[in-house]
Amino acid sequence: MTDSTTTTAKAAPKARATKAKAAPAAATFPDFEAFAIPQMEVPAVFREATEKGIESAREAYAKVKTAAEDATDLIEDTFETSRQGVVEFNHKAVDAAKTNADATFNFIKDIMSAKTVAEAIELQSTFARQQFDALSAQSKEMHEMATKLGTDVSAPVKEAMEKSFKDLKVN
């Protein structure tokens, strides 16, 4: 029993191997029409439509590429304008802080040298008035700078958007 099972098991793989070697894939279906590549002429109308489609796809790609490059340039310019404006704004804020700190130190020096209460009150009133005027002027100047920065940053974007919408309406 053991011999017959072993012989059959060994014989089966050999038979499969010989069948696989004996029948190449091309010889299995030599002239079967389902696997043949049809020889067909492409109609001229179809060819022209395809060429027009390819051409319009190229034009659309060129337009999108140009728009993307313009948008990238606009963003770079906007960031540079914004960076410069913020640097100027920060310099102005530091200058204002230095001016206010210097005025405060001068006030402290003057009030420490005051000989009477009336003189101290006079120094305090003068300092408060000067600081109010200085802070008002500084706030106005900072507001104007911030408004200018906002306009400088948003103006190119606004112009580009208006141009894009006009181009869309024309096409």
Image (tube, helix red, strand yellow):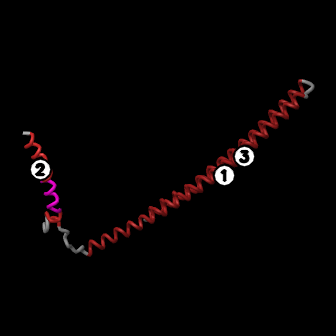
Residue 91, label in figure = 3
Q: Which residue is mark 1?
A: 84
**Residue that protrudes farthest toward the front in the picture:** 3
Task: Give whichever of 47, 130 is nearer the camera.
Answer: 47
46 up-or-down from 95: above or below: below
Q: Which residues are magenta?
A: 15-24
Q: Give the mark nearer the N terminus: 2 vs 1.
A: 2
In the rendered image, the residue lying farthest to the right is 115
Magenta-highlighted stretch: main secondary structure? helix
Please provide percent x and percent y for residue 5: 9, 42
Tag 3: amino acid: His
Give coordinates of residue 117: x percent, y percent. Answer: 89, 24
Q: Are marks 3 and 2 in contact (CB under 8 Å)?
A: no
Q: CA distance from mark 3 to mark 1?
A: 11 Å
Magenta-drawn stretch contains 4: no
Q: Secondary structure at mark 2?
A: helix
What is the three-letter code of the residue carrying label 2? Ala
N-terminal of the pair, mark 3 or mark 2, is: 2
Few, some or many residues within 10 Å of mark 3 (<14, 14–19, 20+): few
